Amino acid sequence: MCPFASYDQALAIKPDSNSALYNKACAYALSSEPDLAFTHLHQAIQLNPENRTLAQTDSDLDSLRQDPRFQQLLAPEG
C-alpha cells in the first residue's frame, strides 16, 4: 500500500483537513521529496497557523530545515 494512500483518502473526504496535509508533508519529507513536502506543509499552515509551532520541533521535518523555504514557512505572518 502506498504510504500516502491514507492521507489521500482522508483528503478526498475532507479536502481542508490540516492534519492530513501536515502528516502528508511529513511523509514526503521522510521520503526525500522536499518539493511535495513544502507544498503540503504550506497548505497545512494556511489552514491552521498552529502547524508552524508544531513544525519547529517535528523531527519528521528535519530533512527540510536547511532549505530556505522552511524558515519562510515558519516565519510569523504580519
Image (spheres, rainbow, N blue to C red):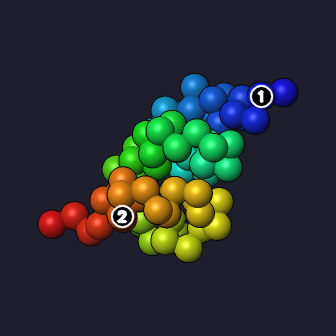
* Mark earlier in primary sequence (2, 1): 1
- Give residue 14's position: percent from left, percent from top: 53, 34
Q: Please name the residue shown 49% across and 63% down the image.
A: 65
Residue type marked 1: Cys
Q: Which mark is residue 42?
A: none
> Mark 2 to mark 1: distance in Å?
29 Å
Local SS, label 1: loop
Picture layout, residue 78 above or below residue 42: below
Q: Please name the residue shown 59% across and 63% down the image.
A: 62
**Residue at mark 1:** 2
- Give residue 61's position: percent from left, percent from top: 58, 59
Q: Nearer the viewer, residue 30 or 55?
A: 30
Q: Nearer the viewer, residue 7 or 30?
A: 30
In the rendered image, which quarter contains the C terminus?
A: bottom left
Picture layout, residue 70 above or below residue 34: below
**Residue at mark 2:** 71
Local SS, label 2: helix
- Give residue 3's position: percent from left, percent from top: 76, 35
Residue type marked 2: Gln
Q: Please name the residue shown 57% across and 26% down the image.
A: 12
